[in-house]
Amino acid sequence: MADPFRVAVITVSDKGSLGLRVDESGPTVCGLVEKAGYAVVGQEIWPDELSVLKNRLTELCDGGQADLILTTGGTGLSPRDVTPEATLAVANKIVPGLAEVMRAESLKKTARAMLSRAVAVVRGQTLIINLPGSPKGARENLEAVLPALEHGLEILTGRSGDCGRS
């Protein structure tokens, strides 16, 4: 990549945001995207609060700060898990194939993958993808979709208009 795509990583964790738990998934995600040639422009930890997450996602997208936002955590069935709701609330378009592939790949390892409520959406020219909160789950899910992201981001950001291949 000549100009690397800019990635913001947001860990969604009540305990992590209070300093009561060490964030391992955020650094795992950052390492993977950096290795793939992306530029991490921010790594943040936020509580499981719908309005807080909606506001931060909107700021990052509308401010043109990131081409890709990867969230980790808040995708399960706990009453406090609101990451998909916050993500859908700011969406202009839904990209279901990414979440479908992540769940399909995870199902090869654990039946619990079907409980994930992760979504992927577009807001403006930013792609937002929800990843699981565990470092292992975040890594496996990101690795499942990483091969398609560069092309998708090229189209989304206008760096390329060619979707077809001969």
Image (cartoon, rainbow, N blue to C red):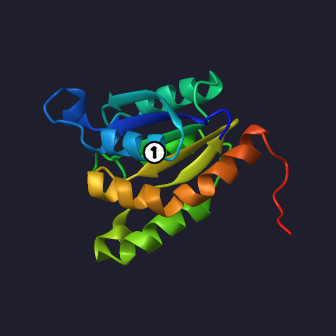
Is residue 86 visible in this depiction of the protein?
no
Residue at the image position 54 percent from the left and 42 percent from the top: 37
Amino acid bearing label 1: Lys
| Of residues 103 and 49, the one drawn nearer to the viewer in this rendering | 103
Q: From what the image shows, is residue 135 above or below residue 145? A: above
Residue at the image position 73 percent from the left and 38 percent from the top: 157
Residue at the image position 69 percent from the left and 36 percent from the top: 125
Q: The C terminus appears in which quarter of the rendering? A: bottom right
Q: The N terminus appears in which quarter of the rendering? A: top right
82 to the left or right of 24: right
Q: From what the image shows, is residue 54 above or below residue 81? A: above
Name which quarter of the figure residue 91 lies in.
top right
- x, y percent for residue 112: 29, 71
| Of residues 144 and 101, the one drawn nearer to the viewer in this rendering | 144
Tally of marks: 1
Residue at the image position 51 percent from the left and 47 percent from the top: 36
Other-residue count near label 1 (Cα within 10 Å), few / some / many at <14 / 14–19 / ≥20 = few
- x, y percent for residue 122: 64, 44
138 to the left or right of 156: left
Give the farthest residue toward the left. 20
- x, y percent for residue 128: 55, 43
Give the farthest residue toward the front. 2
- x, y percent for residue 158: 79, 39
Is residue 122 visible in this depiction of the protein?
yes
Residue under numbered circle 1: 35
Q: Secondary structure at mark 1?
A: helix
| Of residues 27 and 96, the one drawn nearer to the viewer in this rendering | 27
Q: From what the image shows, is residue 43 above or below residue 86? A: above
